[in-house]
Image: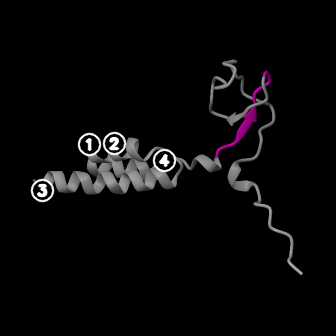
Amino acid sequence: MAYIVIAVSFGVAGGIVGKIKGSSFWLWFLISGLVPFFGLLAAIAYRFERDELRRACPNCGRVTKIYDALCTRCGAELDFPEAAIQPESWQRVPTAPAQR
């Protein structure tokens, strides 16, 4: 019974960390719950999705992460680009115009 409480606690913690980093809550819940301590460490060490460089598909123009090998829209095989697009985390959020 104690192991189940520990596994669920680590699973919830890993799921929350994974969700914050832009990944699936349920995937990291399962990983952290099956291997409690190391699963949570893996979720903490996992990359932030918003910090990944991006690229545009040469066929359809869809912007995907630089590590994607295939375009999810048209299915084209993507080579490593010469120039990358800045990550989502670098883009500024437009502010509303000042009210008078």
Dot 4: within a 10 Å radius of its alpha carbon, few (fewer than 14), some, or many (20 or more) residues? some
Q: Are marks 4 and 2 in contact (CB under 8 Å)?
A: no
Give how far apart the Cα atoms at labels 2 and 3 are: 18 Å
Query: Which residue has dot 4 on it?
Result: 46
Is 85 situated above or below 71? below
Q: Are marks 1 and 2 in contact (CB under 8 Å)?
A: yes
Q: Residue furthest top?
A: 76
Give how far apart the Cα atoms at labels 3 and 4 are: 28 Å
Dot 1: within a 10 Å radius of its alpha carbon, few (fewer than 14), some, or many (20 or more) residues? some
Query: Which residue has dot 1 on it?
Result: 34
Q: Earlier in the sequence, mark 2 or mark 3?
A: 3
Q: Report x, y in % for residue 56.
A: 77, 32
Q: Is residue 2 left or right of residue 8?
A: left
Magenta span includes 53: yes
The amino acid on which the numbered mark 3 sits, given as a three-letter code, is Ala
SS type, badge 1? helix
Q: Which residue is pictured at 35% across the width and 57% down the height?
A: 13
Comparing labels 4 and 2, the label whose residue is closer to the camera: 2
Is 78 situated above or below 51? above
